[in-house]
Every structure is written in structure tokens, then in C-alpha cells.
Image (tube, helix red, strand yellow):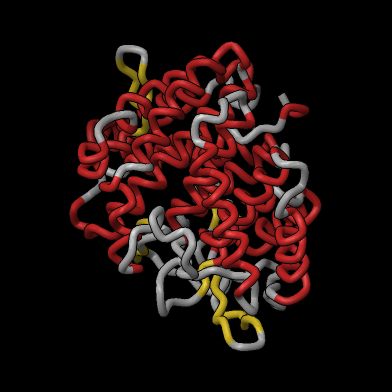
Amino acid sequence: MAILIGIILCPIIIKVIWVLSATYGQGRLKKEEKEIIRRANYLISKVVTEPEQLFNEMPRSIGSQFQGEWALYSCSMTSIALANIATLYPKRRDMAISNIEKIIDIVLSPKIREYDKVRWHEDPLTSLSGNKSHMSYLSHLAWIIGRYKQIGGGDKYDMVYHPICEAMHRRMLQSPSLNLPTYPYENIYIPDMLVSIVALYDYASLNEGKYKAAVDKWIHRAKTEWIDHETGLLASFLEENVNGAEIIIPVKGSYSSLNCYYLSLVDKEFAKKQYECLKKYFKKKYPFTGIKEYHDKSSFYQFDIDSGPIIMNISPSGTAFAIGCATSLNDMKFRKQLLKTAEIAGCTITWKGKSHYLLANWVLVGEAVALAMRTSVQKDQK
């Protein structure tokens, strides 16, 4: 019996020690610098490569469309993480700018934009004068370039940046609801649309407020028209019609966390209210701190392409994005709890100056998201 108990307890004890060791010092960003840079080194080694190789890092089982999406998001989130690092640790600025330049070149490649071209039957960059959305690809590219410029990158990509933002702005205003679809004949995915809002907000900050009015209009309509009455949260999905858009149920934890994160970059007060609603309805305390995928039902296990494997109703992506909410809104206690959960699930591996969650061997985009979220700190929070 003693041997049996020892066999059961041994891996548990090892895991507890592992988690405590890996999360020691988290909560104070100056102490996290070494680990953050090691994680950035890993991402750079995997993302800053040939476009074809990056595409092949994405799981083949998800299909070419999602491989393209995940490759783009890996570039986007890695770039945002590097820009955040440049803000947190100014001595890393040159490193960040240099690598973001390389990532922008990858995103501009035909291979990475192919997934969007297939769905819209035209290339997103050669059709900027047209009226098709292409929001998925264009918004992330614009966001990356905007952050690159904000940390001191030059005007190298302005010939692309300005036309992209002009096209997104024009297409928004042509829509009854100010929303752009990710793909044709599909509903509006609010988290996807919010990337456009963040990108145009950043553009306005760099160009004397240009396009800010459209951002303000969108935020006003979000506050007054697209709030779920039960939870108080911004809708996850909208169905557009000739008069505007209607909310589609359900509100999902993964989408709500991401909505809240993006809003924290545009409208802090709105984001704070959304954050409180998110914690009220979607925070899960047991057996681990995290974000539930559904607030009104539970499932021991299911899989969703956006949420990941939902185990005991905990949403992996919702929990990861909540790290960004907590960081950006300076809720360091909740951030620390979420990072502990990430360590329990992810299991950090460190080797030759690089660190990453073991899960990154299968889902690289998750590693990029996690680093972007935990570094999403404003200058006055450092």
C-alpha cells in the first residue's frame, strides 16, 4: 500500500515542484524579463523563417485555411509580443524592430496570404481598391505595421500601410453595421472585427486622428446595440442585415476574453466593465483558475477550433486571452493565477536560452498568444 501511494503521489509532487519553480517571481515584470526574453527567443527561432516552413509548423489536421490563419496569427502575436517587450524593456527595442521587420516580410508573402485569397477569390493586397472585406488578413497586417511604427520603426512599409487602412476604413463605412465579415457568406465574428478597430485606432494615433471617428462610431454601437442582455458582455457573433446587425447567441468565453483584450487597447473604461462581467460569468476557480467556455452549461470534454480542447468547461484560448485582459488592466493577482494554470497545462521547457510550453510543439500559435498576452502592459504600469 505504501508503494502504491508513493507511485501515485510521486508525479503529483514532481508536478507541484515544477509549477512552483516555473512560476516563481511572476507578478513583477522586471523579474520576469529573463523568462520573457527566453520565450521571445524561442518564438523568433520558430516564426522568423521561410513562409513555407512557418506554414508547415501549423498542424496539417486543421486544413489549409486554418493553417494559414494560425500562421498569420503566430506572426501577429509574436510581433505584438516583441513590440510589448520593446515598451517594457527599452534596451530590447532594436531587437524587436529588426525581427518585426522580418515578420512583416513573411506576412506579405504569397504563401501566408493564400488562405484569404482562396476564400475571397482575389488577392487581398492587389484588390485594395475593391469592396470585398479581406478583413482577416488586412487587419492583422495593419496592426503589426502600426505597432512596429509605434516603437520606432520607420516608414519602410508605409506604401502598404496607408492603402490597407484606407481600404478597411472605406469598407467599414459601406457596411450598415460598420462590420466586415471574416469570410464571405458567414456571420460577423466580433473578435476578428476588433483587430480592424485596434489597427485603425493605432493608425489614428500615428496620423493626427485620421479614421478615429469611425472607431468611435463602432465603439458607440458596440456599447449600445451589441451587448448581451444576460451577461452584459459584447456579443461573440452578429448577423448583419439591411438595418444593421443582430446578436447571435451564445456568448463564448474564448471570444469574450479576446474582445476584452482588444477593447483594453482602445477604450479602457469599456474594457474594465467588460472585464468585470467576464469574471462574474466566466471565471472558473476549481480545479484550476481559468475562463469557462460557456457560463450556462458545462461539458467534461469537447473540442473547438477556436477554443481548443475544452476540459471541464475550461477554455484554453479564453484563459490565455484573459491573461492579456488582466495584464493590460493591471489585475496582477488574477494574472498570476492564470499564468499558474498555463504552467500546469503547458509545462515549460528551457534549453539553450529558449523557453516554451511543451504544447508549443503542437500549437505554436498558443505560445505566441501567451507571450503577447503576458506582456500587454502600458508604459505607466511597468
- The total number of labels drawn is 0
Describe residue 85's horizontal placement relative to residue 57 as left or right: right
Q: Work out whether residue 185 can be spotted.
A: yes
Q: Nearer the viewer, residue 20 or 315?
A: 315
**Measuring 31% from the left and 24% from the top, which residue is drawn there?**
45
Q: Nearer the viewer, residue 349 or 210?
A: 210
Image position, residue 278 (x, y; %): 66, 59
**Measuring 71% from the left and 32% from the top, which residue is drawn there?**
378
Image position, residue 213 (x, y; %): 77, 59
Q: Nearer the viewer, residue 73 or 243?
A: 243
Answer above or below: position of 19 versus 335.
Answer: above
Answer above or below: position of 128 versus 93.
Answer: below
Q: Residue 333 lies in what quarter of the image?
A: top right
Image position, residue 325 (x, y; %): 64, 46
In the rendered image, the residue lying farthest to the right is: 269
Q: Residue 193 lies in what quarter of the image?
A: bottom right
**Measuring 31% from the left and 34% from the top, which residue is drawn there?**
358
Q: Nearer the viewer, residue 86 or 323?
A: 86
Answer above or below: position of 99 versus 112.
Answer: above
Position of the N terminus by quadrant: top left
Describe residue 183's horizontal placement relative to residue 2 as left or right: right
Image position, residue 228 (x, y; %): 68, 75
**Measuring 30% from the left and 58% from the top, which residue is drawn there?**
115
Position of the C terminus by quadrant: top right
Q: Work out whether residue 284 can be spotted.
A: no
